[in-house]
Image: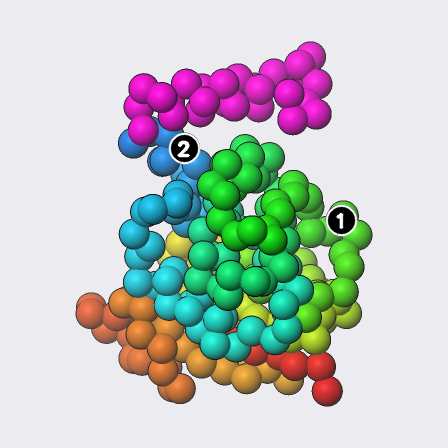
Amino acid sequence: MYGLDIKTQWEEILKIHCIKLAKEIHPEWYRWALTNNYERAVFLKGDPVLPREATRYMWANQNLLGKKVLEVGCSSGYGCQFLPNDTDYTGVDYDPIIINVAQEQNWLEKSQFLEGDINKISLDHYDTIIAFEVIEHLDNGLEIVEELKNHCDRLLITVPWNEPVGFWGPHHKIHGLNESHFSGFKFNYIDQHGRVSDTVVPISPQNQCNLMILRWDRG
């Protein structure tokens, strides 16, 4: 199953069977399990998408270059529903379970979903690469940004702005990211409620976090 060895990877195989069973008899647990303990945002076809997640993909639609698009860390693939219908879309995620879910959704006519570790897979050249809420999850995230530039004409990413250690839990490996880490990018910001602005909205009880939303273009 999924290329896993039952002798050495039986826990992963057990998890897959549990998730499949939950899909039929316990949908709420099924959706929670797909988030990998809230490591990722997951929406299925027909689900309402929360404002912050919807905003960044609508922004991507407005900033898309060309038709050939790669999304790194695609989760269930929900982001591609915000892109033009004729987009030649490839979604990549490290988790075979979420990739299987993405394939089941029938998002775009020209969409495909592949399991792969961004540190190991061989990349083609794309018009646009999208990596939303990915870089901070990788120990070498800033190096990955530079590598992705070699495979696209436009790179769109989001990362938490000046995130303190522990704010989003143990899944984030890089903290305190700000404009100084992304030379050559154009900057916008998304507040806690999904509003895009040209400047950072101050942190307050009403806005406890901001994302940087960044665009890089090949010169």
Graded by Cα atoms within 10 Å as few (under 14), some (14 to 19) or many (20 or more), the crowding at tag 2 reads some
Q: Nearer the viewer, residue 186 or 22?
A: 22
Name the residue carrying label 2.
33
Q: Is residue 208 above or below residue 20?
A: below
Residue at screen point 32% across, 19% down: 25
Residue 127 appears anywhere in the view: yes
Q: Quadrant of residue 5?
A: top right
Residue type indicated by callout 1: Ile
Secondary structure found at label 1: loop
As for residue 84 lying within the magenta part, the answer is no
As for residue 7 lying within the magenta part, the answer is yes
Graded by Cα atoms within 10 Å as few (under 14), some (14 to 19) or many (20 or more), the crowding at tag 1 reads few
* Labelled pair 1, 2 in contact (Cβ < 8 Å): no
Residue at screen point 47% across, 76% down: 62
Name the residue carrying label 1.
121
Q: CA distance from mark 1 to mark 2?
A: 26 Å
Q: Quadrant of residue 216?
A: bottom right
Residue 58, numbered circle: none
Task: From the top left corner, tell me how far across and down residue 91 is, in percent.
Answer: 60, 51
97 relative to 209 in the view: left or right:
right
Secondary structure found at label 2: helix
- Tell me the chief SS of the magenta region: helix
Give the magenta-colored segment's residue range: 1-27
Residue found at the far left of this picture: 206
Q: Nearer the viewer, residue 167 or 207?
A: 207
How many numbered discs, if any? 2
32 relative to 89 in the view: left or right:
left
Q: Which badge, 1 or 2, is on the more N-terminal residue?
A: 2
Residue type indicated by callout 2: Ala
> Which quadrant is home to the C terminus?
bottom right
Task: From the top left corner, tell me how far across and down residue 114 is, in percent.
Answer: 65, 43
